[in-house]
Image: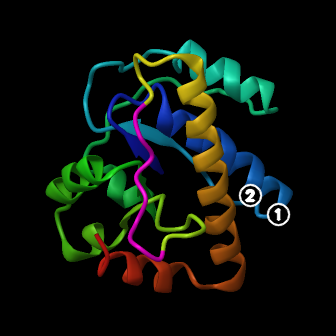
Amino acid sequence: MTVCLGNICRSPAAEAVLVRELEEAGLSDVTVTSAGTADYHVGSRPHHHSVAEGEGRGYAFGSVGAQFVADHFDEADLVLAMDSANEADLLALARTPEDAAKVVRLGAFASGTDGGVLDVPDPWGLPREAYARMYDQIEDAVQGLVRAIQDGSVAEVVAAARTRP
């Protein structure tokens, strides 16, 4: 599950990118969903800039805004936060150490993360160029995640991310 604040910009974009990358990698048996930590946009379609930029890159969007609740931990093997604030919100919702162990920032899988885990900045309210930069960052991190799934290193990346800011 991909998670941002309102579930209309970053997390639906990450969901769309992840669905396609998993499919292209032959991992289409993986279910991907998205949600927001806030209830601002429950039931709303993704932001028009997220959709326009994503469709221009060949991604499809079928989700509507949803709010993350603690029961989502039961459905997810991995909960990918877009930034440290959302990561903290998710960890606060974790009912058990097992729930908390599922939470990691998507940026942990990005290339060039030697100095720490990268946040995916929120483009909401910014011009479309910010959404292009968001997609560039998400695509890089998702490619890293898919490689980690393929080579079995997801748990190692998650553990390493817990030791970096």
Q: Secondary structure at mark 1?
A: loop
The x and y percentages for residue 110 are 56, 64
Residue located at (38% from left, 40% from top)? 4
Query: Seen in the image, is 107 located left or right of residue 159?
Result: right
Q: Quadrant of residue 136?
A: top right
Q: Which stretch did the figure color magenta?
A: 114-122
Q: Quadrant of residue 133?
A: top right
The answer to whether residue 15 is above or below residue 122 is below
Q: Residues within 10 Å of mark 2 (few under 14, many from 20)?
A: many
Query: Do residues under tags 1 and 2 come within 8 Å of each other at their CB atoms?
Result: yes
The x and y percentages for residue 9 are 48, 28
Residue 5 shows which numbered tag?
A: none
Dominant SS of magenta comes to loop
The x and y percentages for residue 16 are 66, 39
Which residue is the site of mark 1? 25
Residue located at (42% from left, 30% from top)? 7
Query: Seen in the image, is 161 located left or right of residue 99?
Result: right
Query: Seen in the image, is 47 located left or right of residue 146?
Result: left
| 76 part of magenta stretch | no
Q: Which quarter of the image is occupied by the C terminus?
A: bottom left
Residue 30 visible to the viewer:
no
Q: Nearer the viewer, residue 142 or 24?
A: 142
The x and y percentages for residue 91 are 21, 59
The amino acid beneath tag 1 is Ala
Residue 37 visible to the viewer:
yes
Q: Nearer the viewer, residue 160 or 91?
A: 160
Question: How many discs appear?
Answer: 2
The amino acid beneath tag 2 is Leu
Query: Seen in the image, is 97 located left or right of residue 158?
Result: left
Which residue is the site of mark 2? 22
Q: Secondary structure at mark 2?
A: helix
